[in-house]
Image: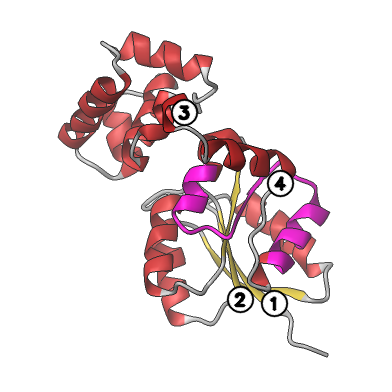
């Protein structure tokens, strides 16, 4: 019998980690070999352990999932990272895949889908849902047809989502581990890129496109 797939779970919610561990423990060819509760810990565990798949949340303290993903892929390009998020696919999936994720799954997905996705990325393939595959195909099309927020950098995009959710610059700075001044720079850049004038217009845009957290 081949060795089980060793999975590292990275999620800041203990209940979520326990639930994932339960799902995977019922599957003989998968084993949860470690847990991380934030992005920094996840990166450190990847550096010091042996893993077949990293299952990682997008929204975590200290270092969010996208930042941790980029670091892991830079140092361990062959290690598949499967992003599991509470955010709908249209918010973060394409960004995660561009950053090097092997797949993207929402936390609303059925447990059997999670098992399928882990097996698939562990075998060296990508995992995307049918709806995400369609979105990816559309994203390859004419650049001018893409919504304005898709042209933002990851940090600008995160700032947009948080402003649309009503967070203050101080709250955004704490969540992204940045200075308030840097957040202001990102805000100014995204206003310019999106041809918007103020936070009210940003919030309206974010709500209209379902970007509020």
Is the image coloured rainbow, by chain, by secondary structure, or in one colour? secondary structure
Q: Are marks 1 and 2 in contact (CB under 8 Å)?
A: yes
* Residue 186 on image: x %, y %: 24, 32
Residue at 72% in and 55% down: 19
In space, the residues marked 3 and 4 are separated at their CA atoms by 20 Å
- Mark 2 or mark 1, which is nearer the start of the sequence? 1
Mark 2 lies on a secondary structure that is loop
Report the residue marked by disc 1. 5
Report the residue marked by disc 3. 146
Mark 1 lies on a secondary structure that is strand
Residue at 41% in and 48% down: 61
Q: Which residues are magenta?
A: 94-120
Mark 4 lies on a secondary structure that is loop
In space, the residues marked 2 and 3 are separated at their CA atoms by 35 Å
- Asked where in the image residue 135 lies, by quadrant, the reply is top right
Of 99 and 16, which appears nearest the observer? 99
Mark 3 lies on a secondary structure that is loop
* Residue 100 on image: x %, y %: 48, 59
Report the residue marked by disc 2. 52
Report the residue marked by disc 4. 129
In space, the residues marked 1 and 4 are separated at their CA atoms by 22 Å
Residue at 54% in and 82% down: 50
- Mark 3 or mark 2, which is nearer the start of the sequence? 2
């Amino acid at each position: 019998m081949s060795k089980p797939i060793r999975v590292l779970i990275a999620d800041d919610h203990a209940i979520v980690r326990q639930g994932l561990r339960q799902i995977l423990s019922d599957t003989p060819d998968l084993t949860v070999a470690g847990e991380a509760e934030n992005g920094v810990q996840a990166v450190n565990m990847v550096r010091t352990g042996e893993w077949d798949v990293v299952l990682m949340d997008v929204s975590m303290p200290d270092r969010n999932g996208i930042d941790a993903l980029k670091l892991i892929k830079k140092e361990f390009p062959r290690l598949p990272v499967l992003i599991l998020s509470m955010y709908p696919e249209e918010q973060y999936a394409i960004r995660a895949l561009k950053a090097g994720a092997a797949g993207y799954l929402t936390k609303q997905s059925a447990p059997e889908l999670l098992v399928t996705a882990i097996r698939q990325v562990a075998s060296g393939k990508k995992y995307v849902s049918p709806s995400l595959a369609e979105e990816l195909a559309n994203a390859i099309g004419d650049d001018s047809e893409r919504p304005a927020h898709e042209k933002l950098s990851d940090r600008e995009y995160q700032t947009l989502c948080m402003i649309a959710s009503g967070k203050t610059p101080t709250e955004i700075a704490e969540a992204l581990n940045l200075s308030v001044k840097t957040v202001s720079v990102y805000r100014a850049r995204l206003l310019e890129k999106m041809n918007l004038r103020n936070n009210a217009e940003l919030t309206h845009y974010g709500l209209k496109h379902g970007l509020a957290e």
